[in-house]
Amino acid sequence: MPLTQEQKDILGALQIARPEAKPQRLRAAARGLTLGASPYALAAVQAPFTQGGYKEALAKERGLLEAYYEQAPWEATGYEIAGAALPAVAGLLTGGTGTAGTAAATSARIAPSLARAAGVGALEGGIYGYLGQKGGLLDMEGYNPLTSERLAGAAGGAAFGAGGGVAGGLAGRAIGAGTRKIAGAVRRKPGGSAGSAVNAELQKLMANTGLSTDEIVSRVGKGEIIADMSDNLRLELRKEFLRGGPGAEEIASKLPARAARTSEEASAAMKKSAFGDVPEENLLRIYQSGEDRLRRAASNDYERIFAQTGEASDEITDIVENVLQRDPDIARTLQRSAALQGKKPFYHVSENGEIILNKFPTVEDVEKMRRVLKDKASKEFKSGDAQIGRDYLDLENTLRTSLDETYDDLRRVREKWSNIESQADTFKLGRTAMNKSVDEIELEFSTILQANNADELVKAYRQGVVASIRKAMGQRAGRAYLSKLSDPTKKEAVIFEAIFPQDMFPDLLDTIARGGDAYKTVTKAMSGSETAGIQARLAAEGTDVIGKDIIEAINPATFAQGSVNLLKKLGKQFMADIDEKQRLQIVRLMMSEDPEAVRRALTDADAQQALIERMRALSRSLTRGGARAGAVGAARLPSEYVLTVTGEKPSQKMMDEIRRLEQARRQGLY
């Protein structure tokens, strides 16, 4: 097809206007990356250093790109499309931290549909088409940002971009499907290494704990098992127990034995904390034997002092005689006591009822009288006669004060005996502590802490508490008591920690918690109340994802529940190939007390899951990047040539002729 002279003149002018162009690969990629905004940005940066300012800098940027496109159209277009796909791929390279990459990955997970690809493609193509035109505010030619040329470019770009987005997305999906198949192959790889399908289930177990691998391993090292770490994991064991088979046999052989062992460990720890290292297991006998030793030692001290002191002083004798004259009942009580011991009293009562001393009373006689006065006061208080009780106490106090001032050794041994008595009373209080309210215990324990012999009393109180708990644990269903002691919402746990503070007894409370958790685990796994529900779920477990599930997951009205249901079904499909042998591996790991074995298994699971997620991310990035590149590539309209020789905008007639000639050239017509 021969050219007319006018056409030859146009082509000649174009050749003059186009000097040999250097490749502008980075500029082309930047244009795709920014959806056509890069020439404006670069012109704004160069404007202060360009003689003609922003307009000349923008013309230069456009001229460089247009010359590159004219000289190497396929190469230039390739770089621009690659730049457009860069944000999605960058999200993968940076681990998903980039804004564009993260948004793309998120949106692809939420609604990976062709409609979405078309919508996003139209938006990006429209932006590209708008920025690809000239005139208006962006060119500093007036203040109108929406010139007819730019609006036309946006409309055309949106139309082409929608189709390109769909095409690019389909291409990306096709490639991404390969990565998903690889991920599935990794997941289903046989054997016990990081490629085992068991590790996919381990990821789910770890998610249920809410803990990291290091935290799980640390807790296993302290005596826990993975199944102890959440009720959901206990129910997983329950499901395996109800399935029957080797997993159920393993559960039945391990969990009850562990619960019994941890219960014994908790009981032993409580005994050691309260009583120390003693072989005797009967705590009442331990306490009683200790009290008996103290009482014998105090009695021996009394006998030694009485043997050394002899008769009481004149002052004390006068007080004794006065007391006997005031209350003949005291005299009769002392007479009966002497008769029972085969001794003669140090006084007698005359026919007219007068007390007559036969001899000076000994210190032992006076001490016995003091005890009788104290007992009398106590009886009167109990009977309700407080005044008489106070009168007896006044007499007892007078006699005791005189004895203490004269015989210091007697005062010390009496304090020792009083401590023994108060410890015995406090031990009895401790045995009833768990039957009281938290408020009662706070008041009771604070009173003990304020006593002069607080250390001895606190020890006795704790011993009483432990004795009562051990008694409860020895009864039917006693192991359930440990779960109460380890549950911070229970009264028993609050009382126990008030008496055995965490900062003073950390190991004790940890041991009790393990025993309580072990009891809860064996109870939920083997005899939980959820049996019927779990059996129904096992029978009705559905794993097929149908169209209805996808529609509900992308429908705004049902998105929340629909997404949850879809993820559950996908998760079940992912685990559908776990066989009986692999379930047994999982059950054993959930009950393992070997921290290194747990670490190896979970580390393998971490590594495998990271590989799978990387492959999935690659698939999403390829899909998203393909859609974006397709949108930009399709939206790129035919180049508009600028006659840089004259610096004038071509006429409409010339532009139409240029487009026709360009099309003919591409078709090889000349």
Image: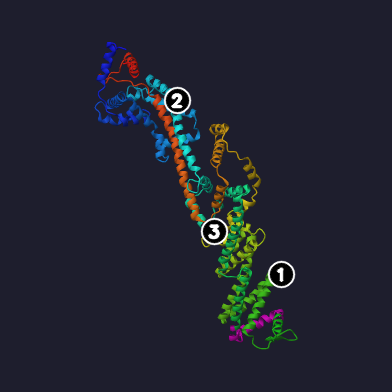
In front: 668, or 385?
Answer: 668
Which residue has dot 2 on it? 162
The answer to whether mark 3 and mark 2 are in CB contact below 8 A is no
| Magenta-span inclusion, residue 548 | no
Query: Horizontal placement of 105 versus 272: left or right?
Result: left
Callout 1 amino acid: Ser
Residue range corresponding to the magenta coloring: 304-332
- Give the residue pinned by disc 3: 510
- Residue 514, image x, y percentages: 56, 57
Q: Residue 228 location in percent, x, y?
A: 56, 53
- Residue 29 vs residue 270: left or right? left
Q: Secondary structure at mark 1?
A: helix
Tell me the chief SS of the magenta region: helix
Disc number lying in front (1 or 3): 3
Q: Which amino acid lies under the numbered mark 3 shown in the image of this protein?
A: Asp
The residue indicated by pointer 1 is 383
* Image point (56%, 64%), residue name: 269
At numbered mark 3, what does the secondary structure look like: helix, strand or loop? Answer: helix
Disc number for residue 336: none
Q: Quadrant of the N terminus?
A: top left
Q: Is residue 323 magenta?
A: yes
Q: Earlier in the sequence, mark 1 or mark 3?
A: 1
